[in-house]
Amino acid sequence: MTDVLHDHPNPRPNGPLNGVRTPNKTPAAPRPRLRRRGLPRANYPAGLGSLIWLGIVGLPLYVLVAATFQTRDGYIDDGPLALPDHPTLANYRRVLRSDFLSYLLNTALVTAVCAAIVITLSVTVGYTVVRARGRASRRIFQIFLLGLAIPSQAVVIPVYLVITKLHLYDTLLAVILPTAAFSLPVSVLILVGTMRDIDEELYESMALDGASPTRVLLQLVVPLSRSGISTVGVMSALHAWNGFLFPLLLTQSKSNRLLTLGLYDYVGEFRVDTPALLTAVVLSIVPIFLVYLFARRQLISGLMGMGGK
């Protein structure tokens, strides 16, 4: 038996004396702890903050909408937080039978024209600033940026004098022109950033094909700047829709009144019809809310600087 062990080709020095080979045992490595997939970790502070923010935003909306279904006496007796005991649509009927639709039409016209003017001018100015790259274009861009530091309240008297000299007082055009002018600086700033994101090789390829600057603008720049243009359109529309100062100072007759001034119809010398007033506010919010609802993606991407990508 001893000779057999010595003649073995690969004797195991640490093996047993009977010649039986045993595996070399090593301590097993600790198994990593597996995380359960599909079960995200709960973030209780974030949830609590979301609930608080929901209450801050939701409470005014609840008061606004609930008041439109109350009578004036019920609103005064029960308070703004009470649910309507007997919901009624009398406030909506009263508002729609008044001059509200005329005010809405005037406001929609002013908003549409302002947005068209701002989009047209800001696209052309932004394209000039991005592609010209000369001293004159830089000066133009600086002048537009200077408009960001000038509030409209500081120039109401010069604007009033210019409008009266042009014989535009008490017209919708008197509201459109200054409203569009004060929307241009931020619009040009947004579109310049959007157009600078367009790849330079695309401009060069269009130039090699013999495209004119107008063709480059319409076929290349405008399609790739949709997000920025949508952002400019929505922001200028919101500015015009919610404008109060210029309609107050530059219009007088009831036929040229806008929604922001039309709300005064429900405010008397000795009383305020709060349910009817809030009903007019709700109805005035709906159109611009629908515009934002359909353009929210372009608005967010344009504000984040991703217009050309």
Image (spheres, rainbow, N blue to C red):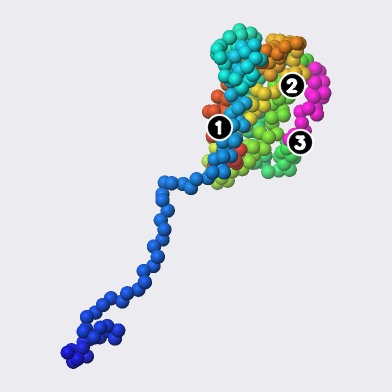
Q: Do the residues labelled 1 and 2 touch (CB within 8 Å)?
A: no
**Residue at image x 54%, y 28%?**
293
Rendered location of residue 103, percent (x, y):
65, 14
- Res 15 quadrant in image: bottom left
Q: How far apart are marks 1 and 3 (CA)?
A: 27 Å
**Residue at image x 67%, y 23%?**
242
Q: Residues within 10 Å of mark 3 (few under 14, many from 20)?
A: few
Kind of residue at badge 2: Phe
**Residue at image x 76%, y 11%?**
269
Furthest-bottom residue in this view: 3
Dot 2 or dot 3, earlier in sequence: 3
Dot 1 or dot 2, earlier in sequence: 2
Q: Is residue 258 magenta?
A: no
- Res 79 quadrant in image: top right
Q: Mark 2 points at which residue?
A: 246
Location of residue 80 with respect to 208 vertically, above or below:
above
Q: How crowded is mark 1: few (under 14 residues within 10 Å), some or many (20 or more)?
A: some
Rendered location of residue 169, percent (x, y):
77, 15
Frontmost residue, 267 versus 234: 267
Frontmost residue, 61 versus 282: 61
Secondary structure mostly seen in magenta is helix
Quarter in which the N terminus is drawn: bottom left
Residue 296, numbered circle? 1
Residue 149, numbered circle? 3
Q: Distance between the residues labelled 1 and 2?
A: 27 Å
